[in-house]
Image (spheres, rainbow, N blue to C red):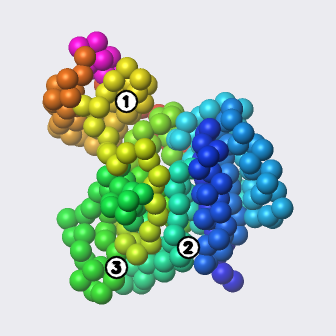
Amino acid sequence: MDDKIAAVVVTYNRVQKLGRVLDSILGQSRSVDRLVVVDNASTDTTKQLLKEYEGDPRLDIVTLETNSGGAGGFAKGMERVYELGLDWAWIMDDDCYPEQDALEKLLAGHAASEELLGYDIPYSCSAVHFTDGTICEMNNPGTTWDWGRLIAQGQNSVLITNCSFVSVLIPRRTIAKYGLPLEEYFIWFDDMEYTLRVSSEGPGVQVLDSVVVHDMPENRGVNFGDLRANNAWKFSYGARNESSYRWHHDNKLAWVSFVLRTWISMRRGNVSRRLQVAMAKQILTGIRFNPKPRKVRTVF
């Protein structure tokens, strides 16, 4: 029997892009068996848009009463996939447009990599492009020291240690063993923490011919030099969360390196003294902040 796959989309007030995302998923060459949409307490016309898709039996809507951020939304969506008894969760943001064969190639690349390497791979991800066809700087995965091992054997995939939650295929066994993303992170670094956690026994893979487009306002990665009053809330979560991870789950040298990189970036970006102090407080908060993964309930 073929494996059952559910796509998971977490959305919050992005109705102008959500329809294209859903159409891209529902039109895949390898059809999804379910499409779980986690509505993170949207206040725009998201509910009305979702009603237009009610005729498709694959649609499964999870409506949250409060906005739980990307971290909480993905945790709820992955938990829903697990409770439905499905074999894979294919997760992505509400501004991610998969090419028509993205899932088909992601599955094929995952299976081929496992066959060649001889062990279970904890997750795989697509290549993420910006809207102009260039690589999306926000979504570059971290690679292993031997990242080209599969390429040397004729495959079109690379070995990775972490990636962002933009077209990531996660097998059921990974969710069962490692639990869910840290909901307490709310936003930023939740995807990094999760993929690093599940890579502890072996790397994931990026399948380079599985392509999605990330429709961001500009093609730029996270840089604390971009910190300003209007985006400080996001950077605050990022500073706290990465500080927590580096301190509790990496090593103290990595934590010091993170602090120095953050400070240098803010200085070079002419970030105000007030915001620099605010980030320093969040970094210190991270030392006391150490949430634990939540496990999923066994359904069989």
**Badges 3 and 1: C-beta atoms under 8 Å apart?**
no
Residue type pointed to by label 2: Gln
Where's residue 156, x and y in %? 34, 79
Q: Nearer the viewer, residue 279 or 293?
A: 279
Residue drawn at x 81%, y 64% is 57
Quick one: which residue is furthest to the right in this view?
55
Give the alpha-carbon distance from disc 2 to disc 1, as whole Å.
34 Å
Q: Report x, y in % for residue 266.
A: 21, 27
Residue drawn 70% across the image and 64% down it? 34
Q: Position of residue 8 (x, y in %)?
A: 61, 56
Q: Residues within 10 Å of mark 2 (few under 14, many from 20)?
A: many
Determine which of the numbered discs, if any, sits on residue 100 in the image.
Answer: 2
x and y, in percent, of residue 142 in the image: 29, 57
Tell which circle, 2 or 1, labels the residue nearer the N-terminal end.
Answer: 2
- Predominant SS of the magenta segment: helix
Marks 3 and 1 sit apart, C-alpha to C-alpha, by: 35 Å
Nearer-the-camera pick, 185 or 97: 97
Left or right of 19, for residue 291 = left
The quadrant where residue 163 appears: bottom left
Q: Quadrant of the N terminus?
A: bottom right
- Residue 180 included in the magenta stretch of the image: no
Image position of 49 with respect to 246: above or below: below
User: Circle 3 is placed at which residue position?
Assistant: 156
Q: Amino acid at mark 1?
A: Phe
